[in-house]
Image (cartoon, rainbow, N blue to C red):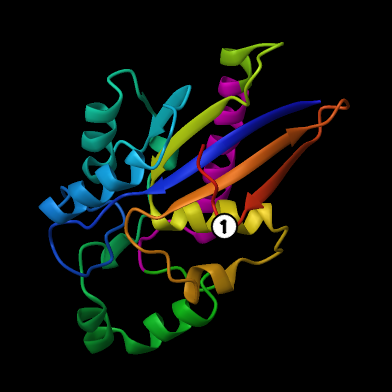
Amino acid sequence: MKNAKLILLRHGECKGGKIFRGLTNVLLSEIGVKQMQTAVERLKTKPDLVFTSPLKRCLEFASSYEKNSIVMPSLMEMDFGDWDGKTVEEILEKQPEALSAFWDEPWDNTPPEAEPLVIFETRVMAAIEQIIDDILTHCGEGVDTTPTALVITHAGVVRHVMSQALSLESGHGLYKDLDLPYAAMVEINLIEDDSGRRHLRLQWPTVID
């Protein structure tokens, strides 16, 4: 049996205000940088590997924290298409019914020109599987401590991984109702049994060591 740990870190506050940020490539605000610095200071030991979304709000901090951080495009936030970069108020003014349908059932009501949620979720889990492969391969057999990967990414990514760890068929409540603040840190424990099956377990509350 093998064990590993994934520490998912949402980016901090961004420039540009409250918008559908998706692939809109903005920098962290000064507050956002401090939020992330405070978050990683909670780590008593540095992770074995650091993975990051290529979007600036994740990448720039990741590069300053670990120069050899691994950039993974599949860790990007959902592409909100025509809504990307716009405020909720702007969408409500022009497309109130479409926005309401998206909030109620996002899998069946993709925003115009956006990435379907099922495609987003598929690429996120492919990224997580690759990260697990890399961390187990990197650390090899016989290590005394649990290998750890820090994954610097976005709210949508974190929410979906949490839903998979909780074996939720639909993670709608985690997308819609869970308050996931900037620079939130979520710990996921991995167990790979002797038959090669992998099990994700949400550590709650997060215990950083």
Left or right? Give the position of 150 relative to 95: right
Task: Locate the N terminus and report the quarter of the image it occupies.
Answer: top right
Residue 173, given in percent of the width and then of the height, sits at 57, 74
Quick one: label 1, few (<14), some, or many (20+) residues within 10 Å? few
Residue situated in front as seen by the camera: 76 or 61: 61
Q: Is residue 119 magenta?
A: yes
Quarter location, residue 89: bottom left
Residue 68, given in percent of the width and then of the height, sits at 33, 18
Left or right? Give the position of 105 relative to 167: left
Residue lying at the far right of the rendered structure: 195
Which residue does the image show at 32% across and 59% down from the upper left?
182
Residue 160, given in percent of the width and then of the height, sits at 55, 56
Residue for badge 1: 205
Quarter location, residue 180: bottom left
In the displayed structure, 127 sits above or below 18; it is above
Which residue does the image show at 49% across and 59% down from the upper left?
116
> Start and end of the magenta stretch?
112-135
Main secondary-structure element of the magenta-colored stretch = helix
In the displayed structure, 53 sits above or below 136; it is below
Element carrying mark 1:
loop
Residue 205, given in percent of the width and then of the height, sits at 57, 57
In the displayed structure, 65 sits above or below 14; it is above
Q: Is residue 111 magenta?
A: no
Residue 88 appears in the rendering: yes
Left or right? Give the position of 44 relative to 28: right
For badge 1, the amino acid type reads: Pro
